[in-house]
Image (cartoon, rainbow, N blue to C red):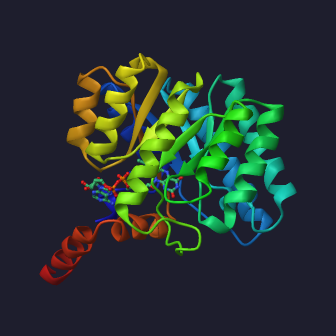
Amino acid sequence: MSRRFVAGETLDEAIAAARKCNELGMLVSLDYLGENVATTTDAQRARDAYLEIFDRIAKEKLSANVSCKLTQLGLDLSPEFCEGLVFTVVERAAGYDNFLRVDMEGSAYTQRTVELVKQVRARNAAVGTVIQAYLYRSESDIRDLLGHSCRVRLCKGAYKESADVAFEKKSDVDGNYVRLMQLLLPSGIYHAIATHDPHMIGETIRWAAAKQISKGDFEFQMLYGIRTDLQRRLVSDGYRVRIYIPYGRDWFPYFMRRLAERPANIGFLLRNFLRR
Ligand code: FDA
């Protein structure tokens, strides 16, 4: 079942999936799966994998950028070491006029991620990050990042968080999502609205139209394998849509997050398992 959400274990499989998306008029962000590495060697291997992805994107002339996680690039080991690796990857991205998106992980990493991205961005602008609408702190993080002209991907948030730091009710998360979208879109910076929720998408479309923010001034983003109907509809309505395509052998934590955010997926998994 992980195949529904993950393009495969190799870069070749991810490239093939990216090409299909491009042919359908969609942009792509490739993610080499992995997180919380335990050694500097593993972090350096991840850096090398990201350098190779940018080279392949350029060689294959794909409309794609790249997403990564800081704990895959050694954030748990040393923020300075991690920043060095990220900077090398961002320089490679910039060399191709491309872009690196730093995903946001659990709230224990939020402050360090925002700080590291700001530091790297001050030296090279080809990097942006992600803000999660379920965290109370997100409005202040967005104001901070906007002050540094940083591109933001807005999502709801995928990690298990406590009520001390995050809204628990879906209606509160959704309300905050809409407020944050309204902060981002008029900033004049190119941001990403990442959600499969038709209500969030509808609010974005209505609000952007009312404020005369054009379709090319932002993009929608969705995950590989989720709501492909909606992805295609937005493209045919003239919106920019980017598909986040994860690949790699370390797919398990990503897959578990996709199962956890939708109980129906677990039922599907169990039914398939029992049938065997
Ligand atoms: P919501 O959960 O309300 O779902 C709306 C609808 O989408 C559902 O009714 C269903 O139809 C469909 N859907 C959603 N999830 C599904 C699933 N797993 N399986 C099947 N259908 C599903 N999070 C994070 O913490 N850090 C990050 O860096 C990122 N990055 C990121 C990039 C991109 C491009 C996207 C789209 C999302 C992320 N996320 C993320 C994940 C995000 O935080 C969130 O967990 C998921 O997008 C689900 O939330 P929705 O906004 O889709 O709404």
Up the image or down, 192 lies above or below 82; here it is above
**Residue 125, x across and y down, in percent:** 73, 29
Up the image or down, 257 lies above or below 150; here it is below
Name the residue at 59% across, 66% down. Answer: 106
**Residue 115, x across and y down, in percent:** 77, 50
Left or right side of 40 for 246: left
Left or right side of 53 for 231: left
Res. 109 image quadrant: bottom right
Up the image or down, 187 lies above or below 79; here it is above
**Residue 210, x across and y down, in percent:** 36, 21
Name the residue at 57% across, 59% down. Answer: 136
In the picture, the quarter occupied by the C terminus is: bottom left
Instruction: Determine the quadrant in which ligand 1 lies.
Output: bottom left
Left or right side of 216 for 23: left
| Residue 89 seen in this snapshot | yes
Q: In the displayed image of the protein, which residue is found farthest to the left?
A: 275
Up the image or down, 127 lies above or below 164; here it is above
Name the residue at 60% across, 48% down. Answer: 139
Name the residue at 67% across, 34% down. Answer: 146
